[in-house]
Amino acid sequence: MHSQLDYRNGILVGLLTHLMCGLQSVLNAVAQLINRLRTHDHITDAVISLNWLQLLERIQHQLAVLAYNVLHGDAPLYLGPLILIDNLPSR
């Protein structure tokens, strides 16, 4: 389940907040199941122990990786024109 939610998080950009909260609760339920927690136990430590990011952080990470791949020529060519480069630092 986790890998299915993690696949191509970039398409979730602009998702409505209530839908994002629903997906985050699914991630929390999976973490709860993996760590065998009860329903009233805190989920924060379980998510940290799994080294999982929150949904919004996952989306931002996916976009950053995609932009990096476009800038370094590792992404499909059709994505190149979609990235506007403004004052790119020298290093």
Image (cartoon, grey):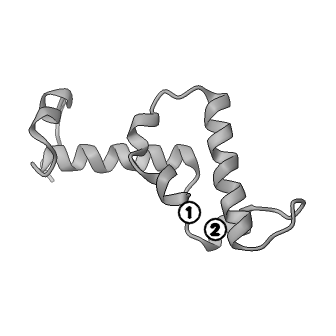
**Number of numbered markers:** 2
Give the residue at mark 2. 48
Q: Up-down: is 44 above or below 87? A: below
Comparing 39 with 1, the one in front is 1
- 51 vs 22, left or right, is left
Q: Quadrant of residue 47?
A: bottom right
Three-letter amino acid code at disc 1?
Trp
Give the residue at mark 1. 52
CB under 8 Å between discs 1 and 2: yes
* Quarter in which the C terminus is drawn: bottom left
The percent coordinates of residue 75 (x first, y second) are: 16, 46
Three-letter amino acid code at disc 2?
Ile
- Residue occupying the point 35% across, 43% down: 63
* Quarter in which the N terminus is drawn: bottom right
Q: Quadrant of residue 22?
A: top right
Q: Up-down: is 35 above or below 68? A: below
How crowded is the residue under tag 1: few (<14 C-alpha within 10 Å), some, or many (20+)?
some
How crowded is the residue under tag 2: few (<14 C-alpha within 10 Å), some, or many (20+)?
few
- Residue occupying the point 67% across, 38% down: 21
The percent coordinates of residue 9 (x first, y second) are: 43, 44
- Residue occupying the point 20% across, 31% down: 83
- 23 vs 38, left or right, is left
| Helix, strand or loop for disc 2 | helix
- Residue 70's disc number: none
The Cα–Cα distance between marks 1 and 2, rounded to whole angstroms, is 6 Å
The percent coordinates of residue 52 (x first, y second) are: 56, 62
Comparing 7 with 53, the one in front is 7
